Amino acid sequence: MARARMMLAAAVCLLIMASTFAADALEPSGWMRAHATFYGGADASGTMGGACGYGNLYAQGYGTRTAALSTQLFDGGLACGQCYKLVCDRKTDRTWCKPGVSVTITATNFCPPNWDLPSDNGGWCNPPRPHFDMAQPAWEKIGIYRGGIIPVIYQRVPCVKKGGVRFTINGHDYFQLVLLTNVGAAGSIKAMDVKGSKSTDWMAMAHNWGAQWHSLAYLTGQGLSFRVTITDGQTLVFPNVVRPGWRFGQTFASNLQFK
């Protein structure tokens, strides 16, 4: 009898272990859990502008596959341009999740905390919650409208872009504010340097806000080269991408892209 009980216990143990392994196998490696809501209307027109500084998301090529990130993910703007793949977690909520679909979004905005509401009831973007407030068309790829908020699993993925990295220069003399758009691979910027055509030295730029970096040197009218390092460690030099005689407000497209 004792031997039979031992064999039964071992069989139960193996069954539990097999079930656990099967459950783990359903969880893709490197994926994390969060929640997602939506904003901006059915045409995503309410998502324009935002805390990354991209302005018109249609014109910049980001379209409606975008999201505002909570404080936990936004990293003070350093996450601007990152791409994420999201799947609605049907193991947690089968009612409002669409089966068998995913959506890839670009981080273009910040979802601020709402300290007047609890984190589990309206204060969805309160720290330390990871949260995506997605453009409505992107959200509806994976969720059913009436649900309002859905559990998701997500992971960083490389950004796939057409054409080269673009540089938009704003500011004034002794203050060049450079916005980077259409950044592939990691999507987000780790460091940036500038060199004027009258110099042989690179000058470090500082992160200002969103996807914008600034220099305090006098570079007005000079041809400009940039050296950009993205958050996966890749560095590219964009030689003379800004031609001499440029004006504030202009955008210059390069022929180079991160892989």
Image: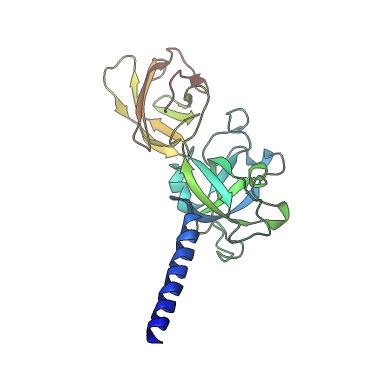
Q: Which quarter of the image is occupied by the C terminus?
A: top left
Residue drawn 56% across and 40% down?
104
Residue drawn 59% across and 49% down?
133
Figure disc tally: 0
Report the front residue among 39 and 177: 39
Query: In the figure, 52 relative to 242: above or below?
Result: below
Query: In the figure, 190 relative to 258: above or below?
Result: below
Coordinates of residue 226 in the picture (x, y in percent): 37, 23
* Left or right placement of residue 97 versus residue 255 in this view: right
Quarter occupied by residue 56: top right
Coordinates of residue 184 in the picture (x, y in percent): 46, 30
Report the front residue among 23 and 144: 23
Kindly tell me whether residue 127 is visible in this rendering: no
Query: In the figure, 213 relative to 35: above or below?
Result: above
Report the front residue among 203 and 73: 73
* Left or right placement of residue 243 versus residue 217 in this view: right
Coordinates of residue 34 in the picture (x, y in percent): 53, 56
Kindly tell me whether residue 179 is visible in this rendering: yes
Coordinates of residue 207 in the picture (x, y in percent): 39, 37
